Amino acid sequence: MNPFTYVNARSFKEASELLTAGRFKLPVLKAGGLDVVDHLKEGLVQADALINIRRLTVDDKPNISAASGRIRINATTTLAELAASPILWKQAPVIAQAVHSAATPQARNIATAAGNLLQRPRCWYYRHEQFHCLKKGGDRCFALEGENKYHAIFGGGPCHIVHPSNLAPALSVCDATVYVTGGTREVLPIADLFHMPARGIMDEHNLTPGEVVTHIALRDKPNSGFYAIKEKQSFDWPLVVACVALDLNGETITSARVCAGAVAPVPWRLEKVEKALAGVKTTDDEGIRAAANLSGEGASPMRDNGYKVKLLAAAVRRAIVRAAGRDPEPKA
């Protein structure tokens, strides 16, 4: 690991300026810093400066606040704070559920909302310095012919990473917007924060140089739910993730938002499932199952990850049931 300068930014604006002023050759922003440390240790980033924004807030407002059907989350809010928030459990439970079992308790106490959204892929070929893959400027995606058990079933390449954030698909079903400083814009929809590999291999987001996320706003979605399936249900990366938000008229679903995670290079919206849920009652298990079974349409699994298609349908069904206020795993 190379020596570097450590700077405590006094504001998001100052952090943006430090990133673009030319004072450092390769400044890197950090809040919790978990992913940054991993990159430094593996030699994936040769930063000469770390710009710390861990203690910054916007307008001295609480990290999580709500008003007029909207919820606001500061960028540096920890996952532990999100998981413990009464506001989120009541008004947007999909958010609290999405981070409640993410990583480990130690990681949740450090990792931040914006850091979770902008973390880099967990693909083992990208993370290992011996593989000069497409994402590091190489000429091939090793997952195509290599071990691809955990890689994408949607998207079509040329890079087959899966987006690593649990929070991103949860925010997607809550119509979230991301607020930034340091550029020509102030806000962008969560769906516009990320891009597919075909639009740029070397990164995963659409922030311009110097843009820094300051906070996130989302709509109240009290009838929402999250479900993840993992090899090991604690302290493990999900194999598939499903996030659902329902609009209800009594027991009837009038509209739905459904987004999958861990199956594509970006949070993957499942529009066919959404359309199929319209008019279905929350007590209609067969109707819910039929809609959930559409979640794998359009998938193109590789040699080792076809199992994700069936797992995704199961996760989506359980997230729908949870969003409807029922137990997705009823006890016998």
Image (cartoon, grey):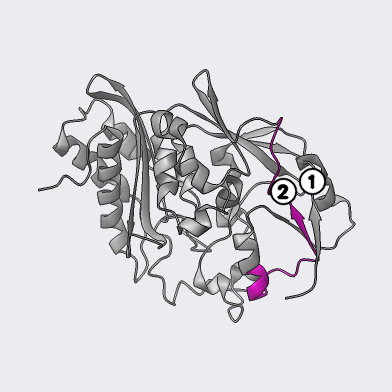
Q: Is residue 195 visible?
A: no
Q: Secondary structure at mark 1?
A: helix
Label 2: element kind: loop
Residue at 44% x, 76% y: name it.
145
Q: What secondary structure predominates along the stretch shown in magenta? A: loop
Magenta residues, start to end: 39-59
The vertical placement of 194 against 104, above or below, is above
Is residue 56 highlighted in magenta?
yes
Left/right of residue 34 with respect to residue 80 in the rendered view:
right
Residue ID for mark 1: 16
Residue 36 on image: x %, y %: 65, 62
Q: Nearer the viewer, residue 206 or 30?
A: 30
Could you tell whether 203 is left or right of 267 in the image? right
The residue located at (40%, 38%) in the rendering is: 94
Q: Which residue matches tag 2? A: 53
Q: Earlier in the sequence, mark 1 or mark 2?
A: 1
Nearer-the-camera pick, 22 or 104: 104
Residue 99: x and y, percent?
45, 48
Occupied quadrant, residue 201:
bottom right
Residue pushed farthest bottom?
A: 130
Q: Quadrant of the N terminus?
A: bottom right
Q: Position of residue 301 (x, y in %)?
A: 36, 63
Badge 2 crowding class, 10 Å Cα cut-off, few under 14, some 14 to 19, many 20 or more, is: many
Q: Residue at x 57, y 54 (%)?
A: 110
Can the viewer see residue 86? yes
Residue 3's quadrant in the figure?
A: bottom right
